Image: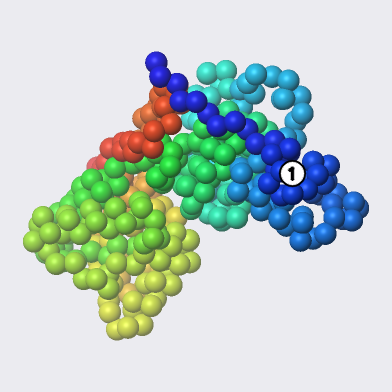
Amino acid sequence: MNHVKQAKRTTIYDLAELAGASASAVSAVLNGNWKKRRISAQLAEKIMRIAEEQGYALNMQASLLRREKSHIIGMLVPKYDNRYFGSIVERFEDMARERGLFPIITCTRRDPELEIEAARTMLSYQVECLIATGATDPDRIAEMCAAAGVRSLNLDLPGALAPSVISDNFSGARELTTRVLSNCRERLGEMQSLIFIGGRGSDHNTAERIRGFRQAHADLGVSVVDDNILACGYAPEKAEKALDDLSSRGMTPAKGMFINSTISLEGVMRWIRRSGRLEEQELVLGCFDWDPFVSLLGNDIEMVRQDVPEMLKKVFEIIESGSNRPVLVQVPPLLASPPL
């Protein structure tokens, strides 16, 4: 088995040399005591910038320095508020403990600065590997980890500098869109351009789902109305506002919708019941997400369930292989038909 040699960990002495300062000055800055030492703000900022560039994090558990390995594995997650990320966290903890590892998990709220702060803290605890789940800037995290000699992987959203395990968003979206269009034909007697709502157009997953959405329309000979693509973000209130804005332009929203998460679905259902613009019984909906309680909403909503067990299996296979090659592994999602 080939093992990739990790980079040497950066030390305080390395930072001191790069900053042109003493090791004690670097230590004071990293410990937050630089004002007491009368170190200038300019030097403090320089040291912190160099520390971040080098992927250095203050070791808050000195006892770990005496161990060859910490047996700690870290994970960053963007949200706890839907079943998908909750199931990732729960299964990750189980699989880590089965392997004798201690999992540390923190939520970063899709905030790039929180992600960096959390990654820096994880590194300070000498994690052996850091998994960035749904990170807004996975490559920046990968660079920090590489500079600190720590392995990193990306889950849910891919990066270019570390191995990535994601769902096959294109194929899943294509199949879900095909089902919703077919349901429109059966239940409404016609197929017309669906609405795509939710997600950020700038992120890989949403872009791939939009590509699959467009391809399914093309497969069935249906033209996509560009104004119907509402990549407005994931928050429920953003989905509501996007539909309000569409209506304010004199457009009646289509009765068929592709909804990009259960979080966005919450906003769509609020809008439908508040606006009175569409009859619920006439709606044909599909959601690229899964929650068993969605069936209680009625409307026979089609759902895509991302295969979390298989995704995490691939993550641990990569970890155990010792490889750091920035491969992209795509796991097919599971289509969950509504109950009869």
Q: Confirm whether residue 306 shows in the render.
A: no
Quadrant of the rendered structure where residue 268 is? bottom left
293 or 76, nearer to the observer? 76
* Nearer the observer, 169 or 33: 33
**Residue drawn at (27%, 58%), measured in percent from left and top?**
210
| Amino acid at the residue labelled 1 | Ala
At 34% from the left and 38% from the top, the residue drawn is: 328
Quarter of image, res 27: top right
Left or right side of 96 for 203: left
Using the rendered view, name the quadrant where residue 292 is placed: top left
User: Is residue 60 positioned above or below 159 on the image?
Assistant: above
Q: Is residue 182 above or below residue 126?
A: below
Q: How is the image coloured?
A: rainbow
- Residue where numbered disc 1 is placed: 16
Q: Of 79 and 19, which appears nearest the observer?
A: 19
Task: Report crowding for label 1: few under 14, some 14 to 19, many 20 or more residues within 10 A (C-alpha).
Answer: some
Visible in this render: residue 288?
yes
Nearest the camera: 108 or 298?
108
Whole-percent x, y for residue 112 in the image: 55, 55
Relative height, residue 246 to residue 322 (above, below)? below
Q: From the top left corner, tell me how far across and down residue 123 is, in percent.
A: 63, 37
Residue 100 in picture, x, y percent from top left: 57, 18
* Quadrant of the drawing holding the C terminus: top left
Would residue 277 be found to the left or right of residue 211 on screen?
right
Where the N terminus falls, by quadrant?
A: top left
Give me the residue at 65% from left, 31% from top.
Answer: 126
Query: Where does residue 60 sit, x and y in percent of width and height?
Result: 75, 35
